[in-house]
Image (cartoon, rainbow, N blue to C red):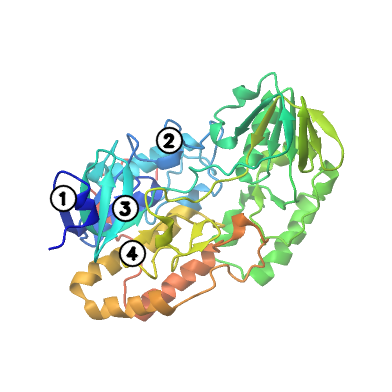
Amino acid sequence: MTESKAEAQQSGPIIDRSTAVAVVGAGPAGLSIARMFRKYGVDYDQFERHTGVGGLWDIDNPGTPMYESAHFISSRDMSGFYDYPMPKSFGDYPTRTQILQYTKLFADEFGLADRIAFDCGVTRIEEDGEHWLVTTEDGTIRRYKAVVCASGTNWHPRMPMHPGHFDGAIRHAVTHRSARDFAGRRVLVVGLGNSAADISCDAAQSADAAFVSTRRGYHIIPKHLFGVPVDQLDDGAVTIPRWIERPVMTAALRVIVGDVTRWGLPKPDHRLFDSHPLLNSQLLHHLQHGDITVKPEIERFDGPDVVFTDGSREQIDLVLYATGYQMKIPYIDESYFDWNGDRPAQYLTAFNRHHKNLFTLGYIETNSSAYTLFDNISNLVAQYVAAQDSNPALTARFERLIANDDPDLSGGLSLVKSDRHKGYIDSKTIKKNIARVLEETGFAPLAPGFAESLRTRPSTLAMR
């Protein structure tokens, strides 16, 4: 047998795990696929560079963008793993600590933590014939049948540059932890995505003065409408077609929220749902009370001042760029993927069309809860891997879809032309496409009670 490049570069033998799968990451996406592998009898090893599960929801995880005031942007009853609802004792929009608690309980109840190598980051993945070589931080190399990249998206800040010299501090939102950091400062938050809106509210409560710079207007949706969490109206048990939902919701917001330009925000340059809306009732409160001043784009820095494109200027102590993240997968060469902007362009967001058994999970921007969506995708990934050894005809049917099927997962939305919206996924549409693929191939859909046999201990979510 010809010696591989990886074998030539190391002194010890490669550990042969060629019938197993390597899972990189033990955040929600990694835990989702791990449970599905257990369900379908797929052998796997899981690697996590941090000391525990939870991914970015653990505020002590180095590099996390998490901050103390963070809450889930989707509601409790829409947001859990499949067939594992969040406790009713949680708020309608759970806190970061509740989400981390829930994630740990999920891993504990299904025996997932016992299979995770903690403090063991992956540094390199490369193809080796029909297998994959995985190198970990200690230099060990293992050979696997497949790999699942599930290490998350919000770890590599996107940092713009503006001309001029600035006397104050410049940071990215990834460094923000607490509203207390803003005390005694005049703070400018650049950007107006959902995290930027949260951080602007932190500044409104603690800073001497709070400003937000935005280049476009957004539709702002309160987290509750008609007394219920708003996402239950969009993606609940009874779903409304988008062509009906859009005008109805637009009219409702006109009555309930009003004209956002009254508070200095630009008029939205797009229809509702053609960009990710802002779900933030606190932002409305602070705008309505004058706690946040809206500014246009930055033109340049000028010593202690920030100069804006309308010619106005403000003395600022801290500029915080809430300008998003690049979806990098740093441990594998980017040439293994097709790309849509900075997102890997995979079939149904998970399946590589050119390199068999190279999966991604969680590299998406979507308009609903991610956890159940992860489970829908994981269910398909796990069955496909299992079928490769047991059902070649089923495998072949699905591989034809991987090669040739190219559904539009945007749901027909005329999305804003921006990096953020390249590869944007409408949750209803991808779920419909997954259901179609399951029917066409013969893979099994998720069904209530599917995971009860996997529990390794009684449920600790007694409040459900």
Q: Quadrant of residue 122?
A: top left
Judged by depth in the image, the label closer to the viewer, 1 or 2, is 1
Q: Position of residue 194 (x, y in %)?
A: 62, 45
Name the disc covering residue 15, or none: 1
Residue 178, compared with residue 442, is above or below; it is above
> Which residue type carries mark 1?
Ile
Q: Which residue is mark 3?
A: 125
Can residue 406 be seen at all in this image of the molecule?
A: yes
Q: Which residue is mark 2?
A: 58
Name the disc covering residue 199, or none: none
Q: Earlier in the sequence, mark 2 or mark 4?
A: 2
Q: What residue lies at 32% left-to-right and 34% top-to-bottom?
A: 51
Name the disc covering residue 381, or none: 4
> Which residue type carries mark 4?
Val
Q: Position of residue 76 (x, y in %)?
A: 50, 47
Q: In this view of the protein, which residue sits in the foreground, 286 or 91? A: 286
**Neighbours of disc 2 within 10 Å: few (<14), some (14-19), many (20+):** many
> Which residue type carries mark 2?
Asp
Q: SS at mark 1?
A: strand
Judged by depth in the image, the label closer to the viewer, 3 or 4, is 3
